[in-house]
Amino acid sequence: MKIDCIAAFLLFLFVLPAHEGAISGVGDDSDLWSKCNCPGSDPNYVAPQDRPPSARMAYLISVHNRRTIQDGAHLLKALIETSTPGDTAIILIHVDRRVGIASRESTMPNEDEKNQFLYHDSWMRRYVDACLAVPACTRSGGAGDINATILEVHTHFSPEWSRWSMNDPTLWAMEYLTHHRILSRARGSQSWDVFVNLSGDTLPVITAERISQLFEPKHGPLGNTNFVTSASCVTGLLPTSIFDFPEHTMKRSHYFSRGTPKTMSYLDEGGNWQLDVEMPIYFGSQWMALTHNFVEYVVRSLSHPNGMGSVLKASLLKTEVQMTDETFFPTILMNSPAFNETIPKLNDEGALERYPSMHSLRYERMDENNPNAWGEWTSSDPLYDITTEFGIETDGEGPAKPWGPYFLGVYDLGSIRDHGALFVRKVSWTVDSNLVRMLPVRRSNNREEGKLEWDELPDMRWPELGVKIRDPFVKAKKKGEKEKEVKTNNDVGDDDEV
Ligand SMILES: *[C@@H]1O[C@H](CO)[C@@H](O)[C@H](O)[C@H]1NC(C)=O
Ligand SMILES: *[C@@H]1O[C@H](CO)[C@@H](O)[C@H](O)[C@H]1NC(C)=O
Ligand SMILES: *[C@@H]1O[C@H](CO)[C@@H](O)[C@H](O)[C@H]1NC(C)=O
């Protein structure tokens, strides 16, 4: 039996890379994930002179299942390989606790835990290991180039959809960033400026280097601004007060019917009691880019038992409202006099005044309120239908929720262009790898005046009369291969059960 197990293990090791080669489409000999090609690791790299100033970014990437771990590898690679040394201070990866993170090297397979090696077997793990081995790309434990990115993988929480626990990874990351010794403000240029939380199936539209330049605190058009929402929110880039939702709409009535208090009392930063102050709830959406000051402020307001953060959290938990992940941060931001003016300034078209090509920071297609609170349908259809093969590949993941967010593909490029977004979600290798291959885009070398990265994107849109793609014949051939692979994997599974 033992020999069976070892045989199965070897077989699995043998099968896996081929399988990955097949779905990643890069052929057998070139492997995307075994090399960390950050710019600093190139022996010929010389730090560019007169580079525009940039913000030091702190990213949190959350992944929660087989698919998002694989997609997250593309996101991680894009961030690491397009940021110039000094642009990205830290990347934290949070792996949902329900995902198995056991190492094959040190753990006996457990037949009750089908997913125990999910992380270990993933592209992401291989790529993280490859990056940790290159001191010019990453610095671990304080060693390495001071401009190299700190890269860490953690697993602490298993957030439940629509519950308070959705906030846990974000809050954990904020505390981590606030207390990290190397990233401490006292170390000046080594600290970080902007915190951005992302899900694994997100991709940057432009390079990490450019994102970091846009956020530069002093002069960057996105500098010193707190974004707690992207444009899928009905008020675009600005948080929506609960009083702005028409009566009887879902979000408004849910919070009111739960008896959310109109006022709250808390101890402010100056140590003064603010008694019974009005504290309207604000909604945002699940995309945030926050300044260092605001993150520290939130952390402090939660660490004091009577701070605004603690009081608001207690109230949200007590009234058992849902969607607190969409309300907690926007509500603190909008009710804090020191920060409520740091929200983005918009022009008449709802775009960013200082960067008018930008209508949302993260583009996604969703129809949250189905139809939305103003009676309009922003989009009402996943458009990219999920096939049976998707379910097999993703370990049984089902289609998107009826209101989205929906998967994106190359037909969405036109909208991504229109929105001028920094990031897009949901982008998955499993659904349309074409889009994954195209992003991020760079500005062309022969720069025309005023031409930005988004202008480099092909202007592709959904055909007006719809489009029906048949299973292409290539796929049919591949299917045969897939069946073989699936079968081999099943064999491994069977052996494990012996
Ligand atoms: C780190 O980056 C900063 C800003 O880009 C640069 O001025 C400095 O020379 C770099 N330090 C090292 C050791 O490369
Ligand atoms: C970012 O943080 C917010 C607040 O905790 C959360 O609702 C959201 O899901 C996070 N977004 C991503 C993409 O992880
Ligand atoms: C910020 O708060 C102050 C004081 O409560 C208020 O006067 C001001 O209108 C607020 N600004 C915004 C943009 O909401």
Image: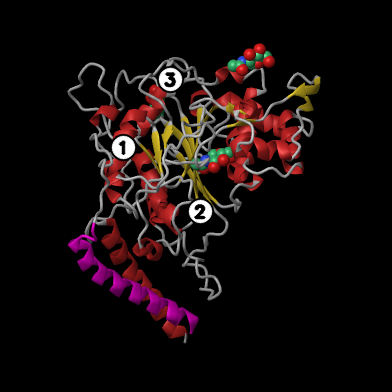
Q: Which amino acid does label 3 sit on?
A: Leu
For marks 2 and 3, give the CA distance. 32 Å
Instruction: Give coordinates of residue 5: x percent, y percent.
Output: 44, 80
Vertical position of residue 288 compared to residue 122: above or below: above
Q: Which amino acid does label 2 sit on?
A: His
Q: Residue at x 54, y 32 (%)?
A: 183
Bounds of the magenta segment: 470-498
User: Looking at mark 2, is its residue's CB closer than 8 Å to ligand 2?
Assistant: no
Instruction: Give coordinates of residue 146: x percent, y percent.
Output: 44, 33
Q: Which residue lies furthest to the bottom in this view?
A: 1
Looking at marks 2 and 1 on the same chain, the residue that comes earlier in the sequence is marked by: 2
Main SS of residues in magenta: helix
Quarter-of-image position of residue 206: top left
Q: Which residue is drawn at 64% across and 32% down?
A: 247
Q: Residue 440 carries which label?
A: 1
Asked if the stretch drawn in magenta spans residue 477, the answer is: yes
Marks 2 and 1 in Cβ contact (< 8 Å):
no
For marks 2 and 1, give the CA distance. 23 Å
User: Looking at mark 1, is its residue's CB closer than 8 Å to ligand 2?
Assistant: no
Looking at marks 2 and 3 on the same chain, the residue that comes earlier in the sequence is marked by: 2
Of residues 303 and 343, the one nearer the viewer is 343
Image side of residue 323 versus residue 443, left or right? right
Instruction: Please tell me whether mark 2 sits on a helix, a strand or a loop.
Output: loop
Ligand 1 lies in which image quarter? top left
Q: Mark 3 points at which residue?
A: 352
Q: Mark 2 points at which residue?
A: 64
